Amino acid sequence: MDSYGTDTVKDLDQTSEEEYATQSKLIKEFITIPSIDKAWIFNSGSGPQAMVAMSQANLLANKRRKFMLSGHISKESSNLSVNFHWAPFPVEMTGASAFAPSPSGLKLLVVRNPDDKESPTKFEIWSSSQLEKEFHIPQKVHGSVYVDGWFEGISWNSDETCVAYVAEEPSLPKPTFDHLGYYTKDNVGLDKAIGSWKGQGDWEEEWGEAYAGKRQPALFVINVDSGEVEHIKGVPRSISVGQVVWSPSSKGVAEYLVFAGWLGDKRKFGIKYCYNRPCSIYAIKFRDASSGSDEPKDDAKEAFPIHNLTKSISSGFSPLFSKDGKFLLFLSAKTAVDSGAHWGTESLHKINWPSDGKLSESTDIVDLIPVVNCPDDGCFPGLYVTGLLSDPWLSDGHTLMLSSYWHSCRVILSLNMLSGELSRASPNDSDCSWSVLALDGDDIVAVCSSPVSVPEIKYGKKVVDPAGRPSWQWLDIQNPIFKSSEKVTSGLSSLEFKILKVPISNVSECLTKGAKKPIEAIYVSSSKSKENGICDPLAVIVHGGPHSIAPCSFSKTLAYLSSIGYSLLIVNYRGSLGFGEDALQSLPGKVGSQDVNDVLSAVDHAVEMGLADPSRITVLGGSHGGFLTTHLIGQAPNKFVAAAARNPVCNLASMVGITDIPDWCFFEAYGDRTRYTEAPSPEDMSRFHQMSPISHISKVKTPTLFLLGTMDLRVPISNGIQYVRALKEKGIEVKVLVFPNDNHPLDRPQTDYESFLNIAVWFNKYCKL
């Protein structure tokens, strides 16, 4: 494993190697549970066929193994049962970066990105029985294809002759020097000559965390018959493109590429996890109706103009056409962009798409799902979607299915575009988390999980009441997509969970109504925990962000902690997603106080309910959760017997000048995005220090484990190291693991494994397990 820790030999002397050996075997069982990533349903002559993309940790290779499982769906109308007849074995997609089935399901595009900056990108076109085409796209055409994150986008056109996608633009020319001292930007072969070398050239801004070394995302189209690749001209380099889709196809009408674009002409702030970056929906013509040709326009011709379709709104992404092609839908995070919060309550909008393909300079934006500020009890709390299915429409053409957070759960929603009616399609009485994977006509294929149950595929059959309103009857499929090991099944068998409503403390009159409502905390425990009248030790889990959420879904690592005897208290403090915009916006300017008090209120609530032993409480968090973890051990020094912090924010004053999101430091400290400057004043630095965990360092007593990634651009490792050294100076017991090849999430398989192995042993040491 590519990590190193302090005092490793001493730790192994104090804690038996047998415990490490025992725990390492068990955590491996949890870490290697497969994940269900995507699914597609295709209707063939023999009935619907399912294709499910899955992934699994490969610890030896330190990568995720991708594979595909196919199956035939059979339905019994007599007893409403559904069965998935899976193929005997999945097919591993070795080296595949992405796969995209064509609309008909007759072709499958497989993209294989190179491991270096010299090799070509490979495109493979598969039919049901064989490889039909293979194309190698050299680096001089483009670099790697963007297959995840904001810039992801692979889209087949309707006649399945072309695929649009986003990839790194070709490398810009760099100066080359020879033995005489000359240099040129044009002589391609000079850098290959003896006695010459390539210089660095001008530095360019990047999009921060997870995008280090990635070139500008640009738009391309490949002809799947000839392999010809066209770099779409007309998109300025100041716009980073993503999420491309094709406009509806109609004879005699111009064909457009529609995509989201992020401006990066001045400063590129970190964009991963950040919805507060201004973006728009753009369209650019690919084929002119008057050309009468099915071939893309020639490179020598002038580029078509680009159209900004959402000028009147600060955020537009995830473009999607209605079934009939009359409307273009898109999501907006305008609350995040306008306020400065890195994520906020979203909204859904539509614009008319011209039937003649002639775009006007101004478009009317219609609200479909507006921002919800203060939801009534039990009512829709607002939209919190990470993306939309490529085909989310029911057969009526106007009902849209999507997944969104609803308090501490993820639910499936149904939106009727004609009536505007929004309803919950997943069970109203379920505290599990649900996500729609694909649609089988009017039926839904979904994945469901909870903190105590592994992900399972569920099938929702549509039923209509006498008033014509749809609902879904949810069925278990007879054959699960995978079976957990005996150790996992045994570890989960006695676990249960519930969502606690926790009243907030110190209610201020200046708070909005939505910010005065109770918070939620997910409590996970063993049904056997109080058989002897003694509570299991409690691990308090605090999520990062802060404008994120810890949903009621399965987490392999947290389930592992539960299985070895820890109750969990997973706190969704004010500022989390899923509770309306008022509650979310109550936190900025009060970080380190309001969120800390919310967590302490949840802990005290659990103790008062008899759910926790106050002498055996630990705390764990990463990023802003690490900020809270280190705040908690400083502000409540006698509350926690042990702590673990993953890439924690410990000192805003030292972070602001080196992070990829310096605007985050200003917004969370002041609650005002206009305070941001590239040159913080002494007053700014004083406030940053005052609101940081390091300002409470003198009170800390809690032994703390730190897990840090050297490649982290969001919270650079120096932030955690400074806090570690300050604790050591005070004589506080610490342990540090550094992962030299990991960035902010610390989510590579070996890192995940070693991190939670050490967290378990560290907590056991102080909880006397």
Image (tube, rainbow, N blue to C red):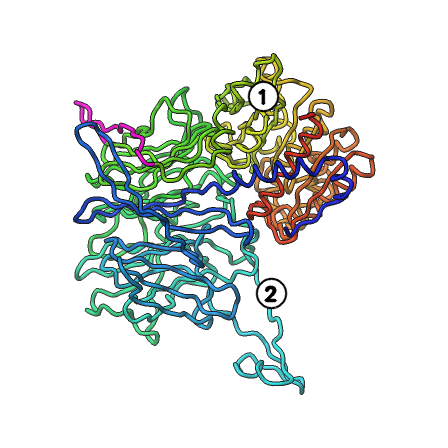
Residue name at image x 27 percent, y 27 percent:
473
Q: Is residue 581 visible?
A: no
For the residues bearing labels 2 and 1, Cβ distance under 8 angstroms: no
First of labels 2, 1 by sequence position:
2
Q: Residues within 10 Å of mark 1 (few under 14, many from 20)?
A: many
Q: What element carries label 1?
A: helix
Kindly identify the amino acid type of the residue bearing the numbered disc 2.
Trp
Q: Which residue in the structure is indicated by mark 1? A: 602
Q: Which residue in the structure is indicated by mark 2? A: 203
The quadrant where residue 165 appears: bottom left
Residue name at image x 51 percent, y 25 percent:
522
Kindly identify the amino acid type of the residue bearing the numbered disc 1.
Ala
> From what the image shows, is residue 701 above or below residue 646?
above
The quadrant where residue 403 appears: top left
Nearer to me, 649 or 428 = 428
Quadrant in which the C terminus is drawn: top right
Alpha-carbon span between mark 2 and mark 1: 48 Å
**Bounds of the magenta span?**
462-479
Q: What element carries label 2?
A: loop
Between label 2 and label 1, give the one nearer the viewer: 1
> From what the image shows, is residue 620 above or below residue 393?
above
Q: Can residue 585 be seen in this view?
A: yes
The quadrant where residue 125 appears: bottom left
Counting from the top left corner in percent of width and height, residue 422 is at: 30, 30
So how many labels did they put on this image?
2
Counting from the top left corner in percent of width and height, residue 184 is at: 58, 81
Residue 474 covered by magenta stretch: yes
Residue 391 covered by magenta stretch: no
470 relative position to 190: left or right:
left
Counting from the top left corner in percent of width and height, residue 31 is at: 53, 41
Residue name at image x 22 percent, y 27 percent:
469
Nearer to me, 18 or 409 = 18
